[in-house]
Image (cartoon, rainbow, N blue to C red):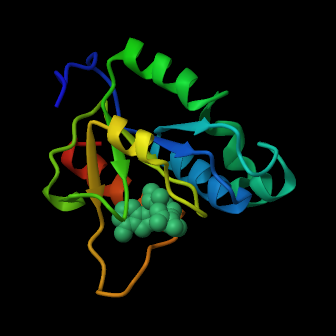
Amino acid sequence: MPERSAPAGLRPALALYQPDIAQNAGTLARAAACLDVCLHIIEPAGFPVGDAGFRRAGMDYLDRAAIHRHASFTAFEDWRRAERRCLVLCSTGGAIPYTAYAFRPGDILMLGRESAGVPDDVHSTADARIVIPMMPGARSLNVALAGAMILGEALRQTGG
Ligand SMILES: C[S@@+](CC[C@H](N)C(=O)[O-])C[C@H]1O[C@@H](n2cnc3c(N)ncnc32)[C@H](O)[C@@H]1O
């Protein structure tokens, strides 16, 4: 675990790794605007960011959302390391139940692709990997729902 010394005054943020479905990304952009957190979109996405489905799900909240687009995971990592932000991967293969994880204000909560999660190298790059425990046999939650649950817990813990 690296030193967790992000600058003061930060709030947790969401990051979407190469999202496939515009409506899910738009839903999370709306949540980001409503809850005053940044949304990082790591491209390429499976849809043109800003397309009709994205705007329909995000509605007018998109105009109020702080959305940062990164051209690649490498570009995102360059930015994140320079900012000294911790990368917390939300994954069905995570080892730590999300309610047992001690969130910090600067954490970036990264969600995987709807179709395939994240590749192994991205999985191992994360500083921590957390999971929402599910019933045996359940494969995964919808990405926007998983993001909302984990962001809610991160904000609760960090006083946000
Ligand atoms: C539909 S799921 C991806 C399913 C994909 N087939 C996989 O195996 O990773 C999309 C994203 O939602 C998040 N997610 C879904 N269920 C989760 C859970 N139980 N715990 C943590 N994250 C979850 C993860 O970020 C995941 O990459």
Q: Position of residue 111 (x, y in %)?
A: 47, 51
Query: Who's the residue at 82% across and 44% down the image?
Result: 48
Residue at the extreme front: 120
Total marks drawn?
0
Query: Who's the residue at 36% across and 65% down the image?
Result: 92
Looking at the picture, does residue 48 appear above or below residue 132?
A: above
**Near-viewer residue (65 or 50):** 50
Q: Position of residue 110 (x, y in %)?
A: 43, 45
Q: Position of residue 143 (x, y in %)?
A: 51, 63
Q: Is residue 143 left or right of residue 53?
A: left
Choose top left, top right, bottom left or bottom right for residue 66.
top right
Q: Is residue 54 left or right of residue 95?
A: right
Quarter of the image where the C terminus is located: top left
Query: Who's the residue at 69% across and 44% down the image?
Result: 62
Q: Is residue 5 left or right of residue 84?
A: left
Residue at the extreme top: 82
Quarter of the image where the N terminus is located: top left
**Near-viewer residue (154 or 93):** 93
Looking at the picture, does residue 30 appear above or below residue 122?
A: below
Q: Position of residue 58 (x, y in %)?
A: 69, 54
Choose top left, top right, bottom left or bottom right for residue 127.
top left
Dividing the image into four equal quarters, which quarter contains ligand 1? bottom left
**Near-viewer residue (77 or 151):** 77
Looking at the picture, does residue 92 appear above or below residue 154?
A: below
